[in-house]
Image: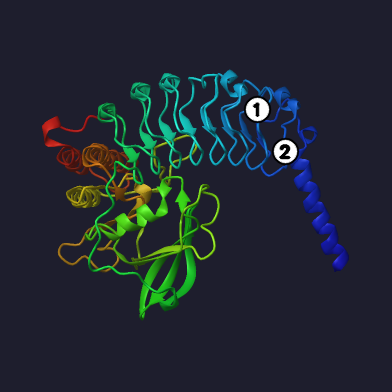
Amino acid sequence: LFALLHLSGALCALGTEDRCLLSSYDAVSTTELDLKHCGYSELPVAVAGFPALVKLDVSHNALRTLPSLPLSLGTLFALGNHFEAIPPAVAALPRLRMLSFKSCRLRSLGEAPLPPSLQWLILTDNRLTALPESLGTLVRMRKLMLANNRLESLPASIGAMRELELLRLANNRLPSLPPWLLEMSKLTWLAVAGNPCVAPAPARASLEQVRFEDLDLGATLGEGTSSVVRRARLHGATVAVKLYKAPLSSDGRNVDEVRASCAVDHPNVLRWLGFLEEGHGEHEGASGGGGSGWRLLGVLEWAPGFSSLGKPPSMSSITRDTYPPEARWSGPQLLAIARGIALALEHLHASSLSHGDLYAHNILWRDDAAAGGGGGGGGPRRVMRGRRVAARRRAAARQCDDSARRAAGLWAAHAASRVAEAGGGGRRGDWAVTSQVANQVASPDEGGPSR
């Protein structure tokens, strides 16, 4: 048995080494290379000899520069390396669509302009203090991640990114938000918490810190990049506990999320019952822990029978949620869901808060009629996750969430049309009702949704 185990370990080690050796691949036909955690301080120049390569992942090595890369590249992940500037080799990639230099040591974007083909740029968790005006030439950009840097201003050229839909600016040093931000018609998801220009979330008087000793943690319900959610018992009641892995995430400081979420109290927002914040959460890297004695968690209401309305965006959809092929809703269900989202946003805005990440995968729903509930007329119940709720400047917050609110109405209309086309119980009347919802949810002075 020992010999077999020893042989198995040797084979596993060999497999890892083979993965990191470019000579183990067919250079002509290989389309993806996974070179994560390979111990590279320099990437072999032979990588340029892969003419069909579309995706390259060199994350979590010790790279400071890059050799020439295949012109066919569409995706390049280089997070967790030692880069202080984006290497010139990146500028020569005409088909590059997605680029990540997250959690490196970037102090600048380099001297060479980035490829204009970029649609998704991740520069989270670096040491950037300024951005070049040339960034505005990336007019195809849809998703720009700049959280956890040291930015004190933004180049006005970013206003030329008319396709930009998602912008993460949380946990920087911005004293104000630029006026051109309100003129970006497609900007729907905006995160700016943790900047000097943003007031802290108001406290909820009825909410107090919980003691970790009072929590009886149970099974894991889910896990993301920034937290783990577990079932638990608190003073005899079943609750959900969200335990954060580190002080920072891709969207800024997790403590900003906790404080803002705790301030919200509305039937259509998942209710926070308590929180625990221990130790100091100052940390430069989002990938690490918060130091000895650091702990951050939230206690949320237990929501049995709920499921996510959609699934997160895929690599190809970028900013659009994805749905399983069997997803079906009736017209009345869609009407109730869209109305619940609008009511939740109205409550947040009244408190000068913005959700900032209003997606179907952050909406929990349950058909109370099917579950045996349905008091007061039945129908689905909607609960918006408190995730990514954060304090904002009110004007920018309202614009971005209003864009998302219009999208909620259009989502309902689009989903209803899918039901009708697929013969899944939808009727022409459902489409008519849901089209009306789309117009009701849109701002009344705009004459209906713009997209």
Q: Position of residue 77 (x, y in %)?
A: 58, 36
Left or right: 270, with 92 as reference point: left
Residue closer to the observer: 83 or 186: 83
Element type where label 1 sits in the image:
loop
Q: Residue at the spot x=83%, y=54% of the render? A: 10
Residue closer to the observer: 157 or 187: 157
Q: Residues within 10 Å of mark 2 (few under 14, many from 20)?
A: some
> Which quadrant of the rendered structure holds the C terminus?
top left
Left or right: 104, with 191 as reference point: right
Check the image and name the residue furthest to the left.
Answer: 445
Q: Quadrant of residue 358?
A: top left
**Residue under label 1:** 53
Specify which label sits upstream in the sequence, 1 or 2: 2
Badge 2 amino acid? Tyr
**Residue under label 2:** 40
One can see residue 308 in this view:
no
Q: Position of residue 283 (x, y in %)?
A: 50, 51
Badge 1 amino acid? Leu
Q: Residues within 10 Å of mark 1 (few under 14, many from 20)?
A: many
Q: Residue at the spot x=22%, y=51% of the render? A: 348
Up the image or down, 213 lies above or below 130; here it is below
Check the image and name the residue furthest to the right.
Answer: 3
Mark drawn on residue 264: none
Element type where label 2 sits in the image:
loop
